[in-house]
Image (cartoon, rainbow, N blue to C red):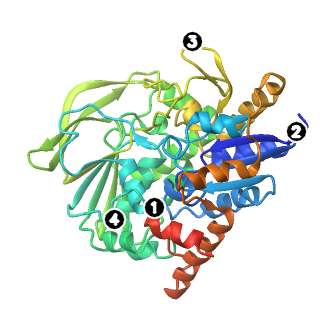
Amino acid sequence: MTRPLRVAIVGSGPAGVYAADILTKSETPVEIDLLDRMPAPYGLIRYGVAPDHPRIKGIVSALHRVLEKPEIRFLGHVDYGVDVKLDDLRHHYDAVIFATGADQDRPLDIPGIDLPHSFGAADFVYWYDGYPEAPREWTLDGEQVAVIGAGNVALDVARVLAKQADDLLSTEIPENVHRGLKDSRVTDVHLFARRGPAQAKFTPLELRELDHQDDVEVIVHPEGFELDEASEEAIRTNNQVKTIVKTLQDWALRDPKNDTARRLHLHFLRAPVEVQGTDRVEGFKVEVMELTGDGNVRGTGEYETYPAQQVYRAVGYLSSPLADIPFDHAAGVVPNDGGRVLDLDGEHMPGVYTTGWIKRGPVGLIGHTKGDALETINNLLADLESMPQAEEPSAESILRLLEERGVEYTTWEGWGRLDAHEKALGEAQGRERVKVVPRDEMVRISRAE
């Protein structure tokens, strides 16, 4: 091939950006377009991580350096499956990589889960992160709230629910989110984990953040705080588990003060059974579990009921199917072999690849997507000789197509304008930045000349 390899990456979150970065460091000359349905880049980092995580800034800085590379072009507000289809991309690019992540809540099949004021965690996260397609208003009119889950997303949801609204003014939360949290009537947030403390999927940093909130008391309930042989082994052999259990043990030994405006309760060995209520959520029923010695649990037949006016389930994410691409609905991933997308016959679709959560499922931390991207890119580069070449590979041809279809795409330069606008909004309020939420406003600012 006498010209640079033309690659389209659908999704500009960490998975897509890491794949682009690895490609630019290969010996193969490349031109990469990162396409995203949102007008702004960064995907999960902008719309899926709690705004009060300080390490986000470091990740954004790293992604920013990659997106500034001359071989990479950002094209936002381009909706794959609507504005462009797979045939379009294969016509204009030699290879297409899908890195669209996981954007839906995994369902939880228990009675009452569909009652009003029972939510998936993703819906709440999208609201407080200012996702353009999320509702602008969120009513927090109950005093007791139940959160189901034992991972970092559950911790994020519980922490934000318990947090004092003004404590988030140091972040980029939109004004409507601050108003919603300011009006919150929440006094007690109860987080329920099905297994024991040694099996929790928290990371130490996220767990410790719970105890660094003004006017919020963290209470670890000793009932269910049990360790079996598998738990003891995990503590001996895994420093992260050791740190988590030690932190929880220290908290469990504290005497509750009950002198704060809000309390965040952690309950272990409590499995969700039923969301109770008639016209809306009124209570939450759990079964008491016991460890079986191997890290698993079984029910005891003993039940507990807690008052709750809202329930949030954080039991995992699922990816959404993509147009013209096979999808494994049970696993929630695109069928692939090392990132090579497989068709219905199990054969590699030439020039089509995937990486990130839509490739392997929503597990692991953000940093794990680097190794994932490396596998995909290595296989893509190994396929170069057999890869079909694009018919119209020029950098301008895809722009002409978008313009012909009336797509108001945004660019990296446009993101610079939006970024500056958000910082100016923040400066006017004595804050670092304020996130713009409406999609049309984001597009207008990004495309302003």
Earlier residue among tags 4 and 1: 1
Instruction: Give me the C-alpha separation between circle 3 and circle 1.
Output: 40 Å
Earlier residue among tags 3 and 4: 4
The C terminus: image quadrant = bottom right
Question: Badge 4 local density, few (<14 within 10 Å), some, or many (20+)?
Answer: some
Tell me which amino acid carries mark 4. Answer: Arg
Earlier residue among tags 2 and 4: 2
CB under 8 Å between discs 3 and 4: no
**Which residue in the protein does label 4 denote?**
136
Instruction: Give me the C-alpha separation between circle 2 and circle 3.
Output: 31 Å
**Is there any visible trace of residue 257 in the rendered image?**
no
**Which residue in the protein does label 2 denote?**
28
Residue 321: x and y in percent read: 46, 33
**Which residue in the protein does label 1 denote?**
129
Tell me which amino acid carries mark 3. Answer: Asp
Specify the label residue 345 is tagged with: 3
State the residue at coordinates (49%, 26%). 327
Tell me which amino acid carries mark 1. Answer: Asp
Earlier residue among tags 2 and 3: 2
Instruction: Give me the C-alpha separation between circle 2 and circle 1.
Output: 38 Å
